Amino acid sequence: VMLILFIRSVGTAFHSPALSAVTPLLVPEEQLVKCAGYTQSIQSASFILSPAIAAFLYAKWGLNSAVALDVFGAIIACITVAMVHIPKQPIEALQQENFFTELRIGYNAIRQNKALFTLLWIGAINMFIYMPINALMSMNYFEGSTLHASVVEIVFAVGMLLGGLLLGAWGGFKKRMANIIGSIFLMGVSLTVSGLLPTNGFMIFAICCTLMGFSAPFYNGVQTALFQEQIQPEYLGRVFGLLGSIMSFAMPLGLVVSGAFADQIGVNRWFLFSGMAILLLAIIALCLPQLRKVDNQKQKS
């Protein structure tokens, strides 16, 4: 089972960057943010519905049949994607190099755009500081059950769904960094408030988790659109692959650090300190001149 999960993760490492890279070939540039918002909404709906459907199928058919259905769904997905016409890049843009050369090309493509390069590392720091240890907060600090932990995960996904739908319908603020900084700020406030709650404040914590989820599309979706707009199409696959690698490294590292600190100082204090750190990150992002010019730094030429 672990081997199969590993193979699936490898597949995801190819699928996600490729999907982000081909999106600008299919979606008009002015609609990229809205497209990202709706994509986040679909993912959030999946987070909400999938556990319930999986539990039903497991109870009715057993694990083997549920996994077989997953394979059947993957086959349908492959067939439908094969039916989509994706415009091809020029031949010279498709030349392949070795792994480290490809990685360096992707890094250099981001490095040339100071705003996106700064945004990349702000996102990595944000991911490192905030890790979803909400279940630990629910069950340890609030002395809840697995039901409380499930509620927290569901309301986070609901918030993310609502945020994605709003971003898809509205498109966000005209100044892209206003969306990103606002998202970081709302996340920081929600974490800080969570860290200040008494042990009987679970309902307020659930509201804070909803706001955390709501803020996510305004960061992830807008950042994805910025990369799609400002990086040359032939480099997008490499860039999104590098972006995914950095975020994938920051997540487990942040989880280890947050878990260790939560054990030493208490999970509520970790929420408080991480919230304050993210608020500081939002202030730093607001003060950086290169980020204020992010909308003007086009590289598609």
Image: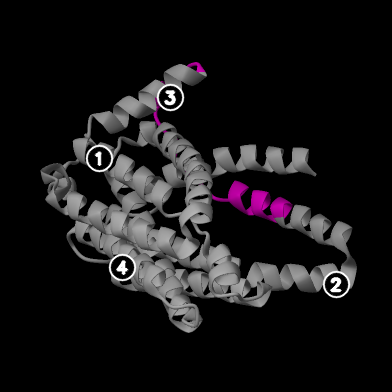
Q: Earlier in the sequence, mark 1 or mark 3?
A: 3
Please identify, in this view, whether the residue under mark 1 or under mark 3 is nearer the observer. 1
- The answer for how far apart the CA atoms under marks 1 and 4 are is 22 Å
Span highlighted in magenta in the image:
74-98
Answer with left or right where residue 264 lies relative to residue 25.
right
Q: Earlier in the sequence, mark 2 or mark 4?
A: 2
Does residue 288 show up? yes
Residue placed under numbered mark 4 in the picture: 189
Would you name the residue on which mark 2 appears? 59
Q: In percent of the image, x 53 and y 45: which residue is there?
A: 256
Could you say where residue 221 lies in the image, as x and y percent from the top left? Answer: 37, 57
Residues marked 2 and 1 touching at CB (< 8 Å): no
Q: Is 153 inside the magenta-drawn segment?
A: no
The answer to whether any part of residue 34 appears in the image is no
Q: Earlier in the sequence, mark 2 or mark 3?
A: 2
Q: Residue at x 38, y 21 (%)?
A: 104
The image quarter in which residue 109 lies:
top left
4 or 3: mark nearer the eye: 4
- Find numbered disc 2 in the image and state the secondary structure of the residue it sits on: helix
Residue at the spot of label 3: 103
**Is disc 4 in contact with disc 3, using a CB cutoff of under 8 Å?**
no
**Contact (CB < 8 A) between labels 1 and 4?**
no
Q: Is residue 147 left or right of residue 38?
A: right
